[in-house]
């Protein structure tokens, strides 16, 4: 790479933006961050493209529109082996799936992530269920914290202190497995750690519901989308 700037340094700045105020660049920044150890010129070009996009949208960020309640909503998605045919065939990452999720509190984006899964999933169901389980590890502690705060803060009477937690999953198989909690011969090889949230779902403390793919707000955290799809999802998440 022949540039007069340090690739890891610039990517670090982009990571700060992507994890704090700009979920719209989370996927792209996650991709360029994979090559911090040995960037090529093509990776530098990708970083410049992200920089130009940020320059064009420098007056925007995330428009906060509270719903007036303290409900938690988790949108979680996965891209099964999305790098296949793009990364070198001999690279283990070429068959790894990507997880993306975003948690809203009272309609406000609170936490979002986009990352490659550590395990190689053998099916779409496995990649989706792995994403759901990983996202639950973030949602459940946040839910406990929100419940504690709601019970101790002087919350106005017009704001509900009952925290409804809902997970939106666009894969029927993952949604049914999470709700029916039945391991079959086709799913028993899943690692035990993926099922840790079953008790809390069984008690009804968190609901797992199906949502159509076109309404899945986490979709742009897992893959490149056509411009019109990307802008529609950005509008749903960031308000512009």
Image: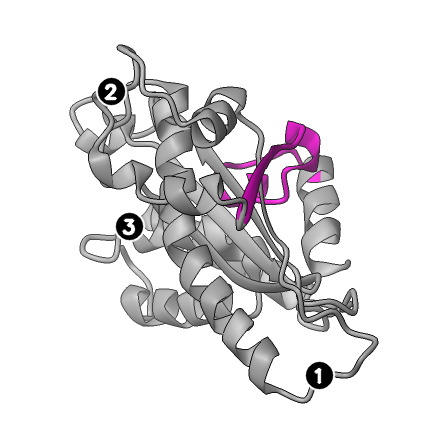
Looking at the rendering, in which quadrant would you find the C terminus?
A: bottom right
The residue positioned farthest toward the top in the image shown: 185
Dot placed on the residue nearer the N-terminal end, 2 or 1: 1
Residue placed most toward the observer, 237 or 69: 69
Q: Which residue appears at 34% of the width and 71% of the height?
A: 5
- Dots 2, 3 in contact, CB < 8 A: no
- Distance between mark 2 and mark 1 Cα atoms: 45 Å
**What SS does tag 1 mark?**
loop
Give the image quarter of residue 238: bottom right
Q: Earlier in the sequence, mark 3 or mark 1?
A: 3
**Magenta residues (range):** 206-227
Q: CA distance from mark 2 to mark 3?
A: 32 Å
Residue at point 18% right, 30% down? 91
Label total for image? 3
Quadrant that contains the N terminus:
bottom left
Q: Which residue is mark 1?
A: 155
Q: Is residue 154 left or right of residue 136?
A: right
Q: Position of residue 13 (x, y in %)?
A: 41, 72
* Residue nearest the observer in this picture, 134 or 148: 148
Which residue is at the far front?
203
């Amino acid at each position: 790479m022949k540039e007069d700037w340090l690739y890891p340094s610039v990517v670090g700045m982009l990571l700060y933006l992507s994890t704090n105020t700009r979920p719209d660049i989370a996927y792209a920044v996650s991709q360029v961050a994979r090559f911090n150890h040995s960037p090529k010129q093509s990776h530098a070009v990708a970083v410049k493209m992200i920089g130009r996009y940020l320059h064009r949208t420098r007056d925007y960020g995330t428009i906060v529109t509270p719903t007036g309640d303290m409900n938690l909503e988790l949108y979680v998605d996965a891209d099964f082996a999305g790098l296949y045919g793009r990364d070198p065939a001999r690279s283990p990452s070429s068959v790894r799936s990507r997880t993306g999720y975003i948690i809203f509190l009272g309609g406000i984006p609170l936490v979002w992530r986009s990352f490659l899964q550590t395990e190689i999933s053998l099916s779409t169901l496995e990649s989706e269920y792995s994403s759901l389980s990983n996202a639950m590890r973030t949602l459940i502690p946040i839910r406990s914290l929100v419940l504690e705060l709601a019970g101790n803060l002087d919350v106005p009477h017009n704001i509900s202190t009952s925290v409804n937690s809902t997970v939106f999953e666009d894969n029927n198989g993952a949604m049914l497995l999470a709700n029916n909690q039945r391991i079959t011969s086709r799913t028993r090889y899943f690692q035990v750690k993926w099922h840790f949230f079953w008790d809390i779902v069984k008690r009804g403390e968190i609901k797992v519901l199906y949502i159509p793919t076109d309404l899945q707000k986490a979709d742009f955290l897992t893959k490149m989308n056509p411009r019109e799809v990307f802008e529609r999802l950005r509008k749903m998440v960031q308000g512009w």
